[in-house]
Structures are given as C-alpha cells and as structure tokens.
Amino acid sequence: MEKNLKPMSGYVALLISILLLFGAVALFFTGMQYNPFLSVMGVLCFILAIFFMKGLMIIQPNHSRVLNFFGKYVGTVKENGLFFINPLYSSQRMSLRSENLQGQTLKVNDKMGNPIEIGVVIVWKVGDTYKAAFEVERYTDFVKMQSEAAVRHLAMSFPYDNLEDDHAPITLREGGDKINQILEQELTDRLSKAGIVIQEARISHLAYASEIAGAMLQRQQATAIVAARAKIVEGAVGMVDMALKKLSEENIVELDDERKAAMVSNLMVVLCGEKAAQPILNAGTLYN
C-alpha cells in the first residue's frame, strides 16, 4: 500500500554541501602547497559534498516522488519543496495533476449489431502512487488501453437508439448522464488496480458509421413521419367526432348514415391532407 513519507528539510543539507565544496577547494590547494594529506582531505570533502547533494530533492506542487531502497519500496513524498533523503534511495517522478485523455474515435457494433462511431473524453489522475508505479508496467499506456476496452464494452452493451429495440431502457443516443455514469463506473473498475482515479468521463462523439448512416437517417425520418401521421389521424378523429356531436346536439342539420359517412370522409381528407383543400360550394339541396 502507499505510504506517505515526510523527509527532512533540504536547506540544511544544501548549506552543508556548499560549505563542504568550499572546504574541499581550500583544503586541496592548501595541501598542494604545504601538506599532501590536506589535499586528500579536500578530495574526501568533495566526495561527501556530492553525496549530500545527491540526496537533495525538489518536488513541484501536485507532483510526487516514489522512493526505493535497493528494490524495496520506502514511501512516497507528496509535499512540495526542497527535501533531503537518503542519497542511496532511487526515486521515480510521478505527477498528481488531472490529465485529459481524448480517446480516438472507435468503430464498433452496438448491441443490435449496427456499426457506430464513438469517442470519449476522460479526466483522470493518479490516486495511489504505489499501484501506479508497481502494479502495472506503464500506467499511462494502461490507462489508454483499458479506456478503449471500456468504451468498446459500453458500445456493445446498449443499442444506439430504440428503433430496433422498443423495450430498451437506456440507449447510447438518449442515455445522457446515465450512460456517462455507467462509463465512469466501468473505467473505475478497470483502472483501480493501477491506482487511477476517474474524475469525469463523457461521450464526445456518437454517430452511425458512414456505410449505414444514410440508410439509418432515412429510417429515422420514416419513423418520424409515421409518428406524426398517427398524431394527425388521432387529432382528426377527435375533431370529426366533436363536429358530429355538435351538429346533433344543436340540431343544426339532420344527417342520415350515408351523409354522415360522406361528411366524415370529407373532413378526414381535409384534416389529414398535406395540401390545403379546395372548397366547393353546393348551392342545391341535401335531399333528392
């Protein structure tokens, strides 16, 4: 598991390193003139100064260092500033900032087998540095590959729309926030083993593949026309029924069944027709 490490401040070690460097130079040149032993001490001071400087570490805001000691995990430093650690530690830089992943547009089949194009935008960051450093080979490549797999699984789990599946509770086109929540959960489950936190996941591109886009557009238009016609017929029937009832209740005119059928036919043609009806005036009588 991740361990937060708080090393000592590096300013004292930096000061010691600078003093050792100056002392090494002074001892070396003094020893060359008077005593060779002092030159040896100067070389030792120089080596010690380099050793101290190797232990200095600068961490920028929202960055971290994962520390190892001869293959053993020591801890992670997440505080920013100048620090001094054991010079024998090896460190791995790791950013804790949020990053965007603009996935490439994928061509996959939806639940009904229709080829579609889908692309997503993912906002993620490293939450557990130990898992990101040691549980996977390269966590950035892992994020890209698993994100693509999650998007493919999402696309194959739901239909693009409900034209072929009238009972589909959720579709990719109309799912909205629900689809995005399912995508976020799918990514969280896949990337948690690498210590990755998913902050947001959104579908950025969704369309039928080019080879069927024209046919599906015609199908959508036909479905819309049928639905509109059904509404028109429903409204026309209601208006005809109301007209007949009004004529009967107010005794405006008496119509037999044949005349009622003719009137219903004429009203349905007028109300359901796409073009305006041409009026015809009948100046004669209704009775022969």
Image: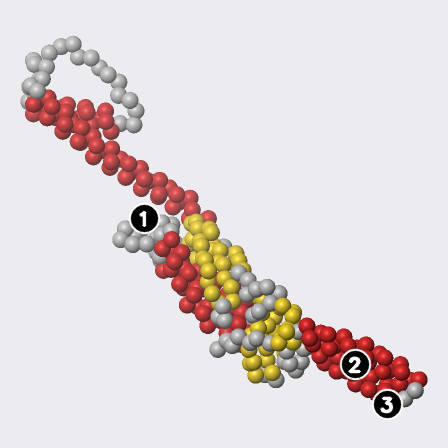
Residue beneath the point at 72% across and 81% down: 51
The C terminus sits in image quarter = top left
Q: Residue tagged by mark 3?
A: 37
Q: Residues within 10 Å of mark 3 (few under 14, many from 20)?
A: some
* Residue 233 x %, y %: 22, 33
Q: Residue furthest right?
A: 33
* Residue 139 x %, y %: 53, 69
Q: Residue tagged by mark 2?
A: 46
Identify the image quadrant of residue 37: bottom right
- Secondary structure under the numbered disc 2 in the rendered image: helix
Colouring rule applied to residues: secondary structure
The earlier-in-sequence mark between 1 and 2 is 2
Q: Amino acid at mark 1?
A: Leu
Q: Residues within 10 Å of mark 2 (few under 14, many from 20)?
A: many
Identify the image quadrant of residue 50: bottom right
Q: Residue tagged by mark 1?
A: 163
- Secondary structure under the numbered disc 3 in the rendered image: helix
For residue 92, side relative to residue 171 (left or right) = right
The earlier-in-sequence mark between 3 and 1 is 3
Q: Is the C-beta separation of discs 3 and 1 under 8 Å?
A: no
Considering depth in this image, is 91 or 245 the residue closer to the camera? Answer: 91
Residue beneath the point at 31% across and 42% down: 223
The earlier-in-sequence mark between 2 and 3 is 3
Residue beneath the point at 38% across and 53% down: 177
Q: Amino acid at mark 2?
A: Phe
